[in-house]
């Protein structure tokens, strides 16, 4: 390195290797996760992730965010991930939860106020937001019982690193159907979809 | 965006540094890929070995809408879309280089981005500017002038002669 002073360079993490194909593939996998709630989907063709973001979260951000989707980042992500999201996706970053089309939450134990998240209106329920939450791990097994479209009977998932109040908020969210937000839980390279149509059927520990 | 706030690009006026970078980015974009390729030995003579770099955004081809104004003053209209290629990279020294070039040459975009990054290194800037950018700019000016000279004789002016009938 040479000695002269300069403005610290903005360290940006590269995006997808092959932006079109990789994004299409991740989109297909997110669609699978959303149409089969409780199915833990392993993403492939993942990009390098910026610090404090998992690979799955980075891939989903690159795939879904674009110029028309205001994005809310949880405070700990704003500095590290804000320029990355802005550069690669062109999405506008917003500070208010209510105006966001997507919310990216670094830590499932520190959620924003979910009551403020956009749930769409009765004529346009698709104007609701999607929340991407990073958790520690996703497993099938005793924990939370899901029912609803896309689930045959019921399925039990065990999510580590997600605040307890999430499940009560999500149950309340489900009762507003067809309005309501959708959720993607991500851990490492995996994703689990929780669309608003999912009913939380008992929380056992 | 944070970057925009820092560099003050939200305001209209550019700093001299930004102005200079805008000029060389434009020259690099308007040069041909072959011209940049031919300039690489000269560049290596100035900076020594080229730094390692990684692609933040691989060269990718896309479209952009070109807008125009009739006569330079009329209302803005969409002239049409054109193909362009863009690239962003970061050198091992930490400099970010960007390029947006017309056409589909990925190599052109990558070289232009690399040279943009090298030009931001204060140690080499003056030399690169004098030995690489300025000659390219002069060549472009000569070509532009030739084009202007060739099209000027074909210019047609339209105007209406007032015949005085509208006066009572």
Image (tube, coloured by chain):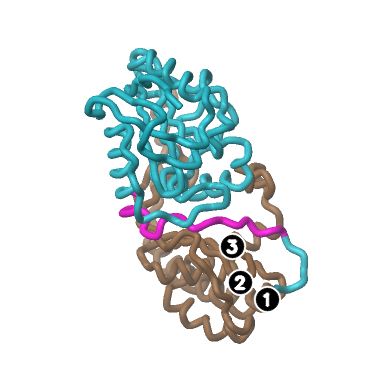
Chain colours: A cyan, B brown
State whether the magenta stretch is mostly helix, strand or loop. loop
Q: Are marks 1 and 2 in contact (CB under 8 Å)?
A: yes
Instruction: Check the image and report above or below for A184 versus B101.
Output: above
Res B122 seen here: yes
Residue B124 - label: 1
Pointer 2 chain: B
Q: Is mark 2 on a helix, strand or loop?
A: helix
Q: Is mark 3 on a helix, strand or loop?
A: strand
- Give the camera-side residue of B5 and A135: A135
The residue depicted at 52 percent of the width and 64 percent of the height is: B89
Q: In this view, does B93 lie to the left or right of A32?
A: right
Q: Which of marks 1 and 3 is in front?
A: 3
Q: Quadrant of residue A170?
A: top left
Pointer 1 chain: B
Residues under labels 3 and 2: Cα distance? 9 Å
Res B82 seen here: no
Q: Is residue A18 magenta?
A: yes
- Point out the stretch of residues depicted in magenta: A7-23
Residues under labels 1 and 2: Cα distance? 7 Å
Q: Do the residues labelled 3 and 2 touch (CB within 8 Å)?
A: no
Pointer 3 chain: B
* Relative image position of residue B47 (x, y in whole percent): 63, 81
- Give the camera-side residue of B65 and B138: B65
> Mark 3 highlights which residue?
B96
The residue depicted at 56 percent of the width and 71 percent of the height is: B115
Same chain letter for marks 1 and 2? yes
Residue B118 - label: 2
* Relative image position of residue B153 (x, y in whole percent): 40, 64
Of the 4 image quadrants, the one containing the C terminus of chain B is: top left
């Amino acid at each position: 390195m040479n000695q002269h002073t300069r403005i610290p360079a903005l360290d940006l993490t590269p995006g997808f290797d092959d932006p079109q194909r990789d994004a299409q593939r991740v989109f297909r996998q997110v669609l699978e996760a959303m149409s089969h709630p409780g199915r833990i989907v392993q993403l492939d063709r993942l990009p390098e992730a910026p610090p404090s973001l998992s690979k799955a979260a980075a891939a989903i951000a690159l795939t879904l965010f674009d110029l028309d989707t205001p994005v809310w980042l949880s405070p700990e992500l704003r500095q590290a991930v804000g320029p990355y999201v802005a550069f690669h996706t062109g999405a506008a970053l917003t500070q208010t939860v209510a105006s966001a089309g997507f919310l990216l939450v670094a830590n499932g134990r520190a959620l924003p106020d979910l009551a403020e998240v956009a749930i769409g209106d009765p004529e346009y329920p698709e104007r609701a937001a999607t929340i991407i939450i990073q958790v520690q791990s996703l497993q099938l097994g005793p924990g939370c019982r899901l029912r609803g479209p896309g689930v045959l009977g019921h399925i039990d998932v065990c999510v580590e690193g997600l605040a307890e109040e999430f499940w009560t908020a999500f149950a309340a969210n489900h009762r507003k159907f067809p309005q309501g937000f959708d959720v993607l839980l991500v851990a490492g390279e995996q994703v689990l979809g929780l669309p608003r149509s999912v009913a939380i059927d008992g929380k056992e520990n | 965006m944070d970057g925009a706030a820092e560099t003050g690009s939200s305001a209209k006026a550019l700093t001299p540094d930004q102005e200079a970078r805008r000029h060389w980015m434009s020259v690099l974009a308007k040069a041909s890929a072959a011209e940049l390729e031919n300039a690489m030995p000269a560049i290596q003579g100035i900076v020594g070995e080229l730094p390692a770099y990684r692609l933040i955004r691989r060269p990718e081809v896309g479209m952009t809408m070109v807008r125009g104004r009739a006569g330079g003053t009329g209302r803005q209209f969409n002239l049409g879309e054109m193909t362009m290629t863009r690239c962003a990279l970061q050198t091992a020294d930490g400099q970010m280089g960007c390029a947006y070039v017309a056409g589909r040459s990925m190599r052109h975009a990558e070289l232009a981005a690399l040279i943009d990054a090298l030009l931001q290194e204060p140690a080499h800037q003056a030399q690169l500017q004098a030995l690489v950018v300025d000659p390219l700019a002069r060549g472009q000016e000569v070509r532009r002038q030739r084009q202007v000279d060739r099209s000027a004789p074909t210019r047609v002016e339209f105007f209406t002669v007032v015949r005085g009938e509208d006066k009572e």
